[in-house]
Amino acid sequence: MRQQDQDAMRRAIELARAQHGRTGENPSVGCVLISADGRRLSEGATGDGGRPHAEQLALTLFEGKLPPGTTAYVTLEPCRERSTGEASCSHRLIEAGVAKVFVAVMDRHPKGAGGKAAIEAAGIEIETGFLEEEAAFLYEDFFASLD
Ligand SMILES: Nc1c(N[C@@H]2O[C@H](COP(=O)(O)O)[C@@H](O)[C@H]2O)[nH]c(=O)[nH]c1=O
Protein backbone atom coordinates (compact mmCIF):
# COMPACT_ATOMS: atom_id res chain seq x y z
CA MET A 1 0.00 0.00 0.00
CA ARG A 2 1.44 3.31 -0.99
CA GLN A 3 1.66 5.97 1.70
CA GLN A 4 0.10 8.53 -0.64
CA ASP A 5 -2.99 6.35 -1.13
CA GLN A 6 -3.38 5.84 2.61
CA ASP A 7 -2.97 9.55 3.33
CA ALA A 8 -5.60 10.46 0.76
CA MET A 9 -8.13 7.91 2.03
CA ARG A 10 -7.49 8.99 5.62
CA ARG A 11 -8.24 12.55 4.58
CA ALA A 12 -11.50 11.34 2.98
CA ILE A 13 -12.38 9.53 6.22
CA GLU A 14 -11.64 12.70 8.20
CA LEU A 15 -13.97 14.69 5.93
CA ALA A 16 -16.73 12.11 6.32
CA ARG A 17 -16.20 12.00 10.08
CA ALA A 18 -16.75 15.78 10.29
CA GLN A 19 -20.18 15.36 8.65
CA HIS A 20 -21.08 12.14 10.48
CA GLY A 21 -24.45 12.61 12.17
CA ARG A 22 -25.32 15.66 10.05
CA THR A 23 -26.43 13.94 6.85
CA GLY A 24 -29.90 12.71 7.85
CA GLU A 25 -30.83 9.30 6.45
CA ASN A 26 -28.00 9.50 3.94
CA PRO A 27 -24.58 8.20 5.01
CA SER A 28 -21.70 10.63 5.38
CA VAL A 29 -19.11 10.12 2.65
CA GLY A 30 -15.75 11.77 2.01
CA CYS A 31 -14.07 12.17 -1.39
CA VAL A 32 -10.56 13.37 -2.24
CA LEU A 33 -9.17 13.88 -5.76
CA ILE A 34 -5.41 13.53 -6.21
CA SER A 35 -3.45 14.26 -9.40
CA ALA A 36 -0.92 11.85 -10.89
CA ASP A 37 1.88 13.97 -9.41
CA GLY A 38 0.35 13.81 -5.92
CA ARG A 39 -1.43 17.16 -5.65
CA ARG A 40 -4.75 17.34 -3.83
CA LEU A 41 -7.01 18.82 -6.50
CA SER A 42 -10.29 18.90 -4.62
CA GLU A 43 -12.26 17.26 -1.86
CA GLY A 44 -15.74 17.11 -0.44
CA ALA A 45 -18.04 15.46 2.07
CA THR A 46 -21.77 14.76 1.98
CA GLY A 47 -23.69 17.95 2.74
CA ASP A 48 -25.96 18.69 5.70
CA GLY A 49 -29.16 16.66 5.33
CA GLY A 50 -27.42 14.26 2.91
CA ARG A 51 -26.91 16.37 -0.19
CA PRO A 52 -24.92 17.15 -2.23
CA HIS A 53 -23.02 13.89 -2.34
CA ALA A 54 -19.31 13.97 -1.58
CA GLU A 55 -18.06 13.16 -5.10
CA GLN A 56 -20.54 15.62 -6.58
CA LEU A 57 -19.20 18.40 -4.36
CA ALA A 58 -15.53 17.56 -4.92
CA LEU A 59 -16.03 17.51 -8.70
CA THR A 60 -18.05 20.73 -8.66
CA LEU A 61 -15.47 22.54 -6.55
CA PHE A 62 -12.74 21.66 -9.05
CA GLU A 63 -13.03 24.16 -11.85
CA GLY A 64 -12.06 22.93 -15.28
CA LYS A 65 -11.17 19.51 -16.57
CA LEU A 66 -9.45 17.01 -14.31
CA PRO A 67 -5.87 16.31 -15.39
CA PRO A 68 -5.23 12.86 -16.86
CA GLY A 69 -4.25 10.30 -14.24
CA THR A 70 -6.42 11.71 -11.44
CA THR A 71 -7.32 9.26 -8.66
CA ALA A 72 -10.48 9.50 -6.54
CA TYR A 73 -10.52 8.25 -2.95
CA VAL A 74 -14.05 7.67 -1.66
CA THR A 75 -15.08 6.27 1.72
CA LEU A 76 -18.22 4.58 0.32
CA GLU A 77 -18.85 2.95 -3.05
CA PRO A 78 -19.92 5.78 -5.40
CA CYS A 79 -23.67 5.59 -5.87
CA ARG A 80 -25.17 3.89 -8.93
CA GLU A 81 -28.40 5.87 -8.94
CA ARG A 82 -29.79 8.97 -7.22
CA SER A 83 -33.23 9.20 -5.69
CA THR A 84 -33.22 12.88 -6.68
CA GLY A 85 -33.00 12.22 -10.43
CA GLU A 86 -29.54 13.84 -10.57
CA ALA A 87 -26.57 12.10 -12.18
CA SER A 88 -25.09 9.38 -9.97
CA CYS A 89 -21.64 9.75 -8.46
CA SER A 90 -20.28 6.76 -10.39
CA HIS A 91 -21.48 8.41 -13.60
CA ARG A 92 -19.96 11.76 -12.59
CA LEU A 93 -16.57 10.18 -11.84
CA ILE A 94 -16.63 8.38 -15.19
CA GLU A 95 -17.60 11.56 -17.07
CA ALA A 96 -14.91 13.54 -15.26
CA GLY A 97 -12.32 11.08 -16.59
CA VAL A 98 -10.78 9.79 -13.37
CA ALA A 99 -8.12 7.16 -13.98
CA LYS A 100 -8.55 5.15 -10.79
CA VAL A 101 -10.93 4.94 -7.83
CA PHE A 102 -10.18 3.71 -4.32
CA VAL A 103 -13.18 2.77 -2.16
CA ALA A 104 -13.14 1.91 1.53
CA VAL A 105 -16.61 0.39 2.13
CA MET A 106 -19.05 -1.13 -0.38
CA ASP A 107 -22.59 0.31 -0.23
CA ARG A 108 -25.47 -2.00 0.65
CA HIS A 109 -28.25 0.41 -0.23
CA PRO A 110 -30.10 -0.58 -3.43
CA LYS A 111 -29.36 2.78 -5.07
CA GLY A 112 -25.80 2.96 -3.80
CA ALA A 113 -24.71 -0.56 -4.69
CA GLY A 114 -23.64 -1.17 -8.29
CA GLY A 115 -21.44 1.89 -8.64
CA LYS A 116 -18.36 -0.29 -8.70
CA ALA A 117 -19.71 -2.34 -11.62
CA ALA A 118 -20.54 0.84 -13.54
CA ILE A 119 -17.04 2.21 -13.02
CA GLU A 120 -15.45 -1.08 -14.05
CA ALA A 121 -17.67 -1.29 -17.11
CA ALA A 122 -16.31 2.11 -18.14
CA GLY A 123 -12.82 0.61 -18.09
CA ILE A 124 -11.70 2.46 -14.96
CA GLU A 125 -9.64 0.65 -12.36
CA ILE A 126 -11.31 0.42 -8.95
CA GLU A 127 -9.91 -0.95 -5.71
CA THR A 128 -12.41 -1.65 -2.93
CA GLY A 129 -11.98 -2.47 0.74
CA PHE A 130 -9.13 0.02 0.98
CA LEU A 131 -8.69 0.98 4.68
CA GLU A 132 -12.18 -0.45 5.13
CA GLU A 133 -11.65 -1.14 8.82
CA GLU A 134 -10.86 2.54 9.45
CA ALA A 135 -13.99 3.77 7.64
CA ALA A 136 -16.45 1.07 8.78
CA PHE A 137 -17.68 3.05 11.79
CA LEU A 138 -19.15 5.65 9.42
CA TYR A 139 -21.68 3.18 7.99
CA GLU A 140 -22.68 0.95 10.91
CA ASP A 141 -25.87 2.88 11.69
CA PHE A 142 -26.70 3.37 8.01
CA PHE A 143 -26.42 -0.33 7.21
CA ALA A 144 -28.35 -1.25 10.37
CA SER A 145 -31.18 1.02 9.20
CA LEU A 146 -31.42 -1.00 5.95
CA ASP A 147 -31.96 -4.35 7.71
N1 LIG B 1 -24.23 10.20 0.65
C1 LIG B 1 -23.59 9.64 -0.40
C2 LIG B 1 -24.03 8.40 -0.96
N2 LIG B 1 -25.12 7.80 -0.47
C3 LIG B 1 -25.75 6.64 -1.13
O1 LIG B 1 -26.47 7.02 -2.29
C4 LIG B 1 -27.86 6.65 -2.16
C5 LIG B 1 -28.75 7.60 -2.92
O2 LIG B 1 -28.62 8.90 -2.38
P1 LIG B 1 -29.71 10.04 -2.66
O3 LIG B 1 -29.85 10.13 -4.14
O4 LIG B 1 -29.10 11.29 -2.04
O5 LIG B 1 -30.98 9.62 -1.97
C6 LIG B 1 -28.06 6.62 -0.64
O6 LIG B 1 -29.16 5.86 -0.26
C7 LIG B 1 -26.77 6.00 -0.18
O7 LIG B 1 -26.75 4.60 -0.38
N3 LIG B 1 -23.34 7.87 -2.02
C8 LIG B 1 -22.26 8.51 -2.56
O8 LIG B 1 -21.67 8.01 -3.54
N4 LIG B 1 -21.85 9.68 -2.04
C9 LIG B 1 -22.45 10.29 -0.99
O9 LIG B 1 -22.02 11.38 -0.57
Image: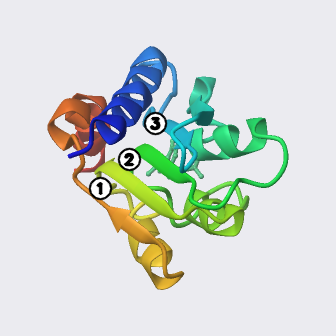
Seen from the viewer's position, the closer of residues 63 and 30 is 63
Q: In the image, 70: left or right of 125?
A: right
Residue 142 percent across, percent down from the top left: 32, 38
Q: Amino acid at mark 1?
A: Met
Q: In the image, 128: left or right of 109?
A: left
Residue 47 percent across, percent down from the top left: 62, 28
Q: In the image, 100: left or right of 1?
A: right
Q: Would you place residue 80 above or below residue 109 in this image?
A: below
Q: Are marks 2 and 3 in contact (CB under 8 Å)?
A: yes
The label on residue 76 is: 2
Seen from the viewer's position, the closer of residues 108 and 104 is 104
Q: Residues within 10 Å of mark 3 (few under 14, many from 20)?
A: many
Residue at point 22%, 29% (across, down): 137
The first of marks 1 and 2 along the sequence is 2
Residue 66 percent across, percent down from the top left: 71, 53
- Look at the numbered disc 2 and say if its residue's Cβ is closer than 8 Å to ligand 1: yes
The first of marks 3 and 1 along the sequence is 3
Separation of marks 3 and 1 at Cα, in angstroms: 12 Å
* Dot 1: element: loop
Residue at point 48%, 56% (across, down): 78
- Look at the numbered disc 3 and say if its residue's Cβ is closer than 8 Å to ligand 1: yes
Q: Are marks 1 and 2 in contact (CB under 8 Å)?
A: yes
Residue at point 40%, 77% (across, down): 117
Separation of marks 1 and 2 at Cα, in angstroms: 6 Å
The first of marks 2 and 3 along the sequence is 3
Q: Would you place residue 2 above or below residue 135 in this image?
A: below
Task: Name the residue that disc number 3 marks.
Answer: 29
Residue 121 percent across, percent down from the top left: 47, 84
Q: Residues within 10 Å of mark 1 (few under 14, many from 20)?
A: many
